[in-house]
Image (cartoon, coloured by chain):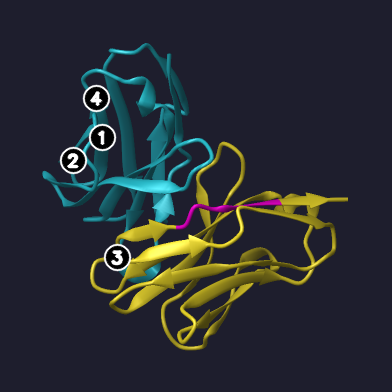
Amino acid sequence: SQTIHQWPATLVQPVGSPLSLECTVEGTSNPNLYWYRQAAGRGLQLLFYSVGIGQISSEVPQNLSASRPQDRQFILSSKKLLLSDSGFYLCAWSQGAEGYTFGSGTRLTVV
Amino acid sequence: AQSVTQLDSQVPVFEEAPVELRCNYSSSVSVYLFWYVQYPNQGLQLLLKYLSGSTLVKGINGFEAEFNKSQTSFHLRKPSVHISDTAEYFCAVSRSNDYKLSFGAGTTVTVRA
């Protein structure tokens, strides 16, 4: 069966520090991968998606970047965090129209 | 591009009472429709989905939803809620040609004894 792992679960980082969040998927090949952000009291905003290794599409301009170095690995990064980067980050994967499967999320607090 | 509107941001309800969460969407192409539930500090869990066929869709935990193409709606219902149904619920839509999900702002359901 397919599983998705996302870590860390919580993270507190100072403003200006770098960020690296990792997501890996098991039990499937060539999945579509996604990073979403959920700000407090708001819905989910699609940040990046990838349909293959090295293929990254950005949905909104921001202080973050994403990379897909391997088929089932998706990384969210920042060189210098801003206060506005705080939120709950969710990784997800999909294949076709069956819907997405989400990871358990990372709570990022920038202080 | 598609958009999703969840008409209620907060829904308080008593235990064993029915609940309906409203969702409307707009899209210029065919869509697939989903409802997800999120418990505090957790990821999203799929409740149910409409891809094609019968417009009444049954999901997990006793939830069901009805797709109404003419009204572009996909309302979620449960005839009798439990305390454990307290959570945030998200309606989502994907285009049939690219599968990117767009979410509504969410509805917080609080079930009281």
Label 3: few (<14), some or many (≥20) within 10 Å? some
The location of residue A32, given as percent across then percent down, is 25, 55
Amino acid type at circle 3 is Tyr
**Neighbours of disc 4 within 10 Å: few (<14), some (14-19), many (20+):** some
Are the residues at dot 4 and dot 3 in contact (C-beta closer than 8 Å)?
no
Local secondary structure at mark 2: strand
Instruction: Identify the element where label 4 is drawn.
Output: strand
Residue depth check, mark 2 versus mark 4: number of the one nearer the observer: 4
Q: CA distance from mark 4 to mark 1?
A: 10 Å
Q: Which residues are magenta?
A: B104-109
Q: Look at the numbered discs 2 and 4 and tell me whether their residues touch, using CB distance below 8 Å.
A: no
- Tell me the cyan chain: A
Kindly report the distance in space between the C-alpha atoms of the residues bearing marks 1 and 3. 21 Å
Whether tag 1 and tag 2 are in contact, CB under 8 A, the answer is yes
Residue position for label 1: A75
Q: Nearer the viewer, mark 4 or mark 1?
A: 4
| Numbered-mark total | 4
**In the rendered view, does A17 fall on the left or right side of A70?**
right
Residue at point 67% right, 71% down? B77
SS class, disc 3: loop
Q: Earlier in the sequence, mark 1 or mark 2?
A: 2
Q: Is residue A44 above or below residue A76?
A: below
Label 1: chain? A
The three-letter code of the residue at mark 1 reads: Ile
- Give residue B99's mark: 3
Q: Chain of mark 4?
A: A
Residue B65: give x, y in percent of width and height.
59, 75
